[in-house]
Amino acid sequence: MNYSQYFGEFGGRYVAEVLRPSLELMEKEFLDIIEDRDFWKEFDILSKDFTGRPTPFMFAENSTRIIGGASIYIKLEGLANTGAHKINNALGQVLMAKRMGKKRIIAETGAGQHGVATAAACAKLGIPCTIYMGEIDIKRQRPNLFLMNLYGAEVIPVRFGSRTLKDAVNAALMDWSGSFEDTHYLIGSALGPSPYPSIVKTFQSVIGKEVKSKIAEKKIDVEAMVACVGGGSNAIGFFSPFLEENTPRLIGVEAGGKGSDRGKHASRMSGQGKSGIIQGYKSLFLTDKEGQILPTHSISAGLDYPGIGPELAYYGKTGRIEYTSATDAEALEALQFFAKNEGILFALESAHAGAKAIELAGTVSKDKAVIINMSGRGDKDIFITAKLLTPDEWLNFLRNEV
Amino acid sequence: MKNRLMCHLIANYPDFNKSFEIAEALARGGADSIEVQFPFSDPSADGPYILKACDIALKNGFTVDKGFDLVRRIVNITKLDVFIMSYANIPYTRGLESFVKESASIGIRGLIIPDLTLNNDEGLIELGEKYTIPIIPVITLTTPQERIDAILSIQPEYVYAVLRKGITGESTEITNENITFLKNLSQEGVKVLGGFGINSREQVNSLAPYLFTSVAGTVFVKEIEKETGDMINRIEVLTASLVTDQSTTTSKGGDFSSSINICR
């Protein structure tokens, strides 16, 4: 495997001196396990029996017919245990942490999916964990808080800053600065100081590998693969076997939120992202002209983050990955479209990819295919989607419950 | 008898004029030097007090230009040694060279950018040499010896010694481990600035023999936050209480004389 701390100009390890030794140790361990057959054997067994891999690869026949363009396929990654791709990386890193002799796991979470996955993996593998989650995200994703607690995790609300994902990352970094000797910080996205982006990509690459073998098996002529991009863990995993090839087109969909005004979206690759060094890595961030992080907005907590994984920023710069964005409204519409026509429920994050894939499929000829990564399923979002789509009924339901 | 003390303040906290008045109070109270933190929205090595103070400073309109204006005034009027501390993205966004150049032109004594470290410094160390302004590396209790050697091999004028794990603002108990760590460092002939969790005269006293200067930060933010009486006066009194060594100060041995500079 090609391992580097940098991806072009992006990446690196910009952390306080106190965290350097832990990252160096982690890098060594990571390079070790890549070659360790026993490690991968254990990972594969758990992936199969616990996560439920391989996840289905579905021909969206009805949607294809309705749109009338390219064949639409959907990787149903959200059918993995705990409801999203996050479990792949959580499982891998918990195994790695145990191999390093760590006694405790900490993690940050935005939407809560990474927190839930981490809590479940820790429950399965018998190691205590603490999850940091922004207070605003807790409000948006209350059910996930309940689940994390059920899996035995301690969840600490983060009450400073914008009280969202970026602040949860800061809180976890603060914890880790004092606890690194016996604690592993399990970053859930393909970002942070090196070697995290590479570790997360490695554990998530299982998504892309499964898709690649299905493409070969079904002899599909793929025009494009489409994934949503917050920090970018599902996208980098989904795209990974294709990054060094020239085809198919790889399309990352960012949160267009409520429009392109400052603070109303989380599109870093739309031209508004500026080169920055934040939270341990160099990449493109939504910052003001002084370098202070700007507020972001997305209907989906998982895309509501000011930075993008460094490797994804790099491939954006080289042009290998194309970026676009979907608004809150477009995501919500796509979610309803696939629910009604395919009987599958996209997470709001993944629905951003769904929205742009539908759009694209309509412009591509019928002998081609477009593949969407449904990185998560949308059960977790009902407090948002039900409230928006059926406000009166939902309110009545909640009243009755109270 | 007086201990050397570097006092930390946050530029534009609680506002521009007050932060300058605080600097004057620190000077009157007997501080030797001032570390001015340029606030960043996401200061991941800082505890809740400094974090909140940075938030307020930003809400009240901090800009890097204002930060440099403030530092210029502090240097010109108090005549103290002034250091600037910030996180990487602030100087990086300004342009590292322009940031270092402007810092040097103001006459500050050094720059502390904790997330730009040796080998991941974006050229900061070279720029420090070019504009003859010390870039101050951080060394912690858990930094491996070979890393310490690498850092010292670039011959920094100062190093910032972090006295415990974790973030700023939690209290630090001065242990034998701290003392051994500082003794070893000060034998290297580098000026050691020691901080993280310094909030009492006793701590300053017990560290003084091993440090060029102690650094206190959060204790001032906590004092500023209190809403009783004349804040500026309280800061002056607090500074004086930290620097005054009322016990009999004795040198703890001659083998780290390079760091002993406690009496003036």
Image (tube, helix red, strand yellow):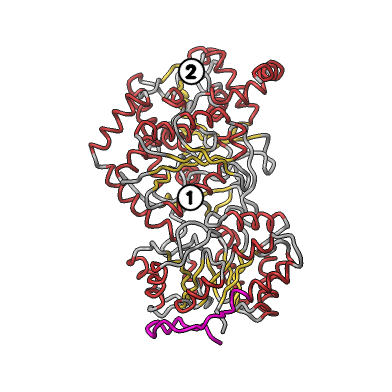
Residue B244 magenta: yes
Span colored in magenta = B241-264
- The residue under label 2 is A366
Q: How far is disc 2 from disc 1 in space, using C-alphas?
A: 52 Å
Front-most of residues B238 and A236: B238
Q: Label 1 marks which chain's residue? A: A
The answer to which of marks 2 and 1 sits earlier in the sequence is: 1
Residue at mark 1? A175
Query: Callout 2: few (<14), some (14-19), or many (20+) C-alpha neighbours within 10 Å?
Result: some
Q: Is residue A217 left or right of residue B206?
A: left
Q: Which type of secondary structure does the marked residue at label 2 adopt?
A: loop
> Can you tell which mark lies on residue A263?
none
Query: Tag 2: residue type?
Result: Lys
Q: Residue at x 47, y 83 (%)?
A: B260
Percent from the top left, x then y, of residue B242? 59, 74
Q: Residues within 10 Å of mark 1 (few under 14, many from 20)?
A: many
Q: In the shown orientation, is residue A211 left or right of residue B196? A: left
Q: Are marks 2 and 1 on the same chain?
A: yes
Residue A202, percent across and down? Answer: 36, 39
